[in-house]
Amino acid sequence: MPLKFNLFNKHPEIVYGITEQADGSMGYTTPGYSKPEHFNNRKVYFRKQGINSDQVFFPNMEHGNIIVVINKQNELKSQPVADGVVTKLTGVVLAITSADCFSVYAYDPVQKVIGLAHAGWKGVVGGVVPNLIKTLTIYCQSLKKDILVGIGPGIGKCHFEIKPETLPHYLAYSECIEQKGEKIFIDLEGIIVQQLLFAGIKKENIGLSKQCTFCLDKIYFSNRRDKPKLLETMISFIMLKNVNGG
Ligand SMILES: [Zn+2]
């Protein structure tokens, strides 16, 4: 079930996707925490995509709202704390790992710049998605009207139940809160869409995967569903191809 956003169809110059259970767990972005089998799974997966693992950049994610800009090849080996990345470099793969959190893919075909954010509930309420858009407009000269955004698989409203004490974080998004009896569910994808619209992204430039990681139990890992001892993760990635064939 390859991930496909219709709004990216016109742009064969970008490559993007998300791994599945069948590809194995992809480990963690915190330096030193991944195991050899995770690195091997990454290598095998990227090789299948025709991608050299040395060209893949993972930020050191911490459910925050910091976005980094990668300007030079030699920055690929740095591991800055960030939950989003932006680059104009071709042939460089921006990647995050997740297991219920949303991946937000961005592309501006005019400035030829790509971005990727890791958006779990903390990142979402902390503003990682608006910060991704700000980074594109301020540092990469993107115009809001040109930015295309795809929201990848993540935990849907069907399964994202919250504890009442975290409800205050969501009160600004009342239409994304659903109460069913005693239970409270949150539509994180809906909140991301609202934030994108508020940030000036056109509605027709926002694509949704509409895939709940918890529901799709044969395809994706879900931390909420599986409660594994050791977190099992997928990689989401995006790359701008080198048009000269690299
Ligand atoms: Zn679900």
Image: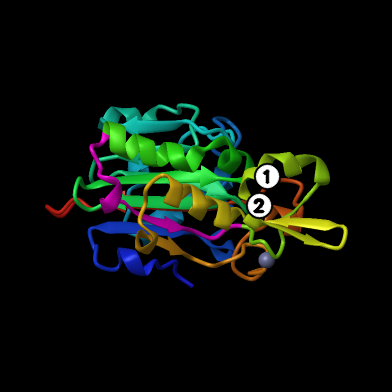
Residue that badge 1 annotates: 171
Residue 143 lies in the magenta-colored region: yes
Q: Position of residue 189 (x, y in %)?
A: 56, 56
Residues in magenta? Answer: 140-154
Residue that badge 2 annotates: 174
Q: Residue drawn at (26%, 52%), measured in percent from left and top?
A: 146
Could you tell me if the residues under marks 2 and 1 are in contact, i.e. CB atoms within 8 Å? yes
Q: Residue drawn at (40%, 27%), measured in percent from left and top?
A: 78
Residue 19: image tag = none
Classify residue 69 by image quadrant: top left
Q: Taking 159 as reference, is 125 above or below it? A: above
Residue at disc 2, secondary structure: helix
Frontmost residue, 159 versus 79: 159
Q: Taking 89 as reference, is 158 above or below it? A: below
In the image, taking residue 11 as reference, residue 176 lies left or right, namely: right
Residue at disc 1, secondary structure: helix
Q: Position of residue 139 (x, y in %)?
A: 28, 31
